[in-house]
Image (cartoon, rainbow, N blue to C red):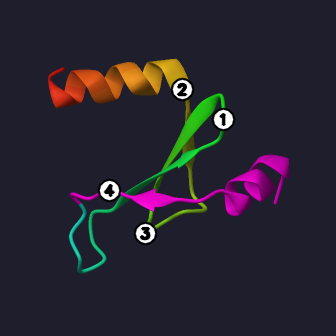
Amino acid sequence: MNANDDQAAELTWVKSSYSAGDGGQCVEVADAGTAVLIRDSKCPDVAILNVPSAQWAAFVRMAAGV
């Protein structure tokens, strides 16, 4: 486990409100300050996407149609 893994483990991960309650198709995000981390809750240790906060905010606005 590297330093990034340690940081990710300490963050508060939030599951998408659109995720099914049966444990399937789940996306989780965590605010890491200057970045937003995104992972698959079924495989949290496999890969974590790191997106700058400004780009994440732009994506959310676009997805929300704002």
SS at mark 1?
loop
Q: Amino acid at mark 3?
A: Lys
Indicate which disc, 4 or 2, sits on the residue closer to the N terminus: 4
Comparing 39 with 31, the one in front is 31
Q: Are marks 1 and 4 in contact (CB under 8 Å)?
A: no
Q: Amino acid at mark 4?
A: Ser
Indicate which disc, 1 or 3, sits on the residue closer to the N terminus: 1
Q: Which residues are magenta?
A: 1-18
**Residue 53 numbered tag:** 2
Which residue is identified by label 3?
42
| Viewer-side label of 3, 2 | 2
Q: Residues within 10 Å of mark 2 (few under 14, many from 20)?
A: some
Q: Residue furthest left?
A: 65
Indicate which disc, 3 or 4, sits on the residue closer to the N terminus: 4
Snapshot quadrant of residue 8: bottom right
SS at mark 3?
loop
Q: CA distance from mark 1 to mark 2?
A: 8 Å
SS at mark 2?
helix
Q: CA distance from mark 1 to mark 3?
A: 24 Å
Residue 14 picture location, percent across and down: 45, 59
| Viewer-side label of 1, 4 | 1
Indicate which disc, 1 or 2, sits on the residue closer to the N terminus: 1
Q: Are marks 1 and 2 in contact (CB under 8 Å)?
A: yes
Q: Are marks 1 and 3 in contact (CB under 8 Å)?
A: no
Which residue is identified by label 4?
16
